[in-house]
Image: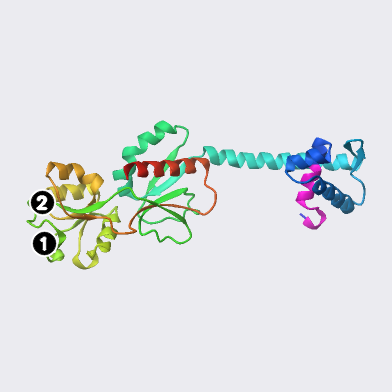
Amino acid sequence: MDWSRIPSLAALRAFEALSRHGTLSAAARDLNVTHAAIAQHLRTLETHFGEGLASRDGQTMRLTETGRELADALGDGFSRISEGVGAILDRNAIRPITVTLTPSFAEVWLMPRMGQFWAKHPDVEVRLVPSVGLADLRRDGIDLAIRFGTGAWPGYEVEPLAVSRFAVVAAPDYTKARSIEELGRLGAYDWYFSSAANEQRIWGRTIGIDFERIGAQDMANNGMVLSAVRAGLGLSIQSLALVEPDISSGQLTTLYEGDPEGLGYYVLTRPGVLTPGARTFRTWLRRMAQAQA
């Protein structure tokens, strides 16, 4: 396409509005510009084509034969553009939204609440993709990511989502210690973690527990980890939301709990406009987190 032969799109848009409304004033109101701006665009087009496109007839503007030819072409072109834009917007409005999140967050916090979201928004289809690593949101077509850390993810829009606290837990009979300090040498104990989660290790490093140095046993899932800890085989770091029933019943005890500053769950999105469904889901996440705070 030779763009050098095509006048400015602003001028073409102004002329198309003039052809529909028949007056400079009505076209100006339609485009939210001044009467003089429409007149200037008309003069620009007439200079470009080297002939008149419209002439005044009382209060209205009458199109010349060439003006009518241009108006028909613009009407077809802009209608085609409108249809294409509308189709994309409609597709984004109804397509499923894809959310990548850590397996622990899905198990402990999100899944127990998803029924509430679906009850309120049955028209929004959500596809959950549990993953420990941060995906390329644009490349993989992901709308939102929920990750655990300090909020340092360059290139993304990052919003804190304070929804869960963690604690060091053990069976009461595993150790007589009732605090991290009383444990003494941490490497002398067996630590259990799930290979499908990384929150516990990140949280541990923040409070000064170096699992690269003291070692830990990975298990296939967090259910196996909790079974081992309840059986008195070792220690683990767990979400308080997950183990509160065990703590209340006395099956587990906490040796340390707290909220290291800046550490927590965050919602990550690509810079730019979210689809309507993604905005709805993000707003719901905020409300649910605030209700728990």
Residue at screen point 80% across, 58% down: 4
Q: Which of 44 and 224 lies nearest the eye of the viewer?
A: 44
Q: Mark 2 points at which residue?
A: 232
- Three-letter amino acid code at the position of disc 2: Gly
User: Could you tell which of marks 1 and 2 lies nearer the N-terminus?
Assistant: 1
Which span of residues is magenta-colored?
3-16
Helix, strand or loop for disc 1: helix
Query: Residue 196 has which mark?
Result: none
Helix, strand or loop for disc 2: loop
Report, in whole angstroms, how far the alpha carbon at label 1 lies from the one at label 2.
18 Å
- Quadrant of the snapshot with the C terminus: top left
Residue 43: x and y in percent read: 87, 50
Magenta highlight: main SS:
helix
Q: Is residue 47 above or below residue 290?
A: below
Q: In this view, does 281 lie above or below 134?
A: above
- Three-letter amino acid code at the position of disc 1: Glu
Residue 147 falls left or right of residue 80 = left
Residue 201: x and y in percent read: 26, 59
Q: Mark 1 points at which residue?
A: 182
Q: Write down the quadrant of residue 113 in the picture.
A: top left
Query: Which numbered mark, 1 or 2, is in the foreground of this view?
Result: 1
